[in-house]
């Protein structure tokens, strides 16, 4: 596949990603992208925020998941 075709494919995939995440809240978007293997800088670019904000949200998400898991074990 040529470089131009790869570039077009990447644009198309990015557009599909943005459309599929459009109706979700930022925290949900970040969680999904993190689970999909995106790095914090890439998540920030897709979501439209800073890598630091993504880091803070991921910490919140993980803390909430731990809390829910601990509640379930009680």
Image (cartoon, grey):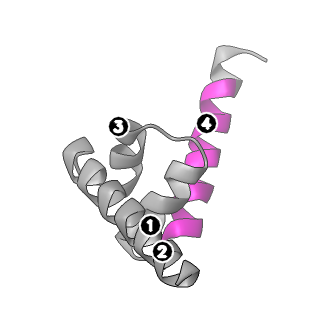
Looking at the image, is mark 4 or mark 1 nearer the viewer?
A: 1
Q: Are marks 1 and 2 in contact (CB under 8 Å)?
A: yes
The earlier-in-sequence mark between 3 and 1 is: 3
Q: Is residue 74 above or below residue 66?
A: below
**Residue at 63 percent of width and 46 percent of height:** 12
Which residue, given by chain and number where applicable, does mark 4 sit on? 10
* Quarter in which the N terminus is drawn: top right
Looking at the image, is mark 2 or mark 3 nearer the viewer?
A: 2
Q: CA distance from mark 4 to mark 3?
A: 17 Å
Which residue, given by chain and number where applicable, does mark 2 sit on? 70
Write down the quadrant of residue 72 in the picture.
Answer: bottom right
Q: How many residues crowd around disc 1 within 10 Å: few (fewer than 14), some, or many (20 or more)? A: few
**Residue at 39 percent of width and 72 percent of height:** 64
Q: CA distance from mark 3 to mark 1?
A: 24 Å
Q: CA distance from mark 2 to mark 4?
A: 40 Å
Which residue, given by chain and number where applicable, does mark 1 sit on? 66
Q: How many residues crowd around disc 2 within 10 Å: few (fewer than 14), some, or many (20 or more)? A: few
The earlier-in-sequence mark between 2 and 3 is: 3
Residue at disc 2, secondary structure: helix
The earlier-in-sequence mark between 4 and 1 is: 4
């Amino acid at each position: 596949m040529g470089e131009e075709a790869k570039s077009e494919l990447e644009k198309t995939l990015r557009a599909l990603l943005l459309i599929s995440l459009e109706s979700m809240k930022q925290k949900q978007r970040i969680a999904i992208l993190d689970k999909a293997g995106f790095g914090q800088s890439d998540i920030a670019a897709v979501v439209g925020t800073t890598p630091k904000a993504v880091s803070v949200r991921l910490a919140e998400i993980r803390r909430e998941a731990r809390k829910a898991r601990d509640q379930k074990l009680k």
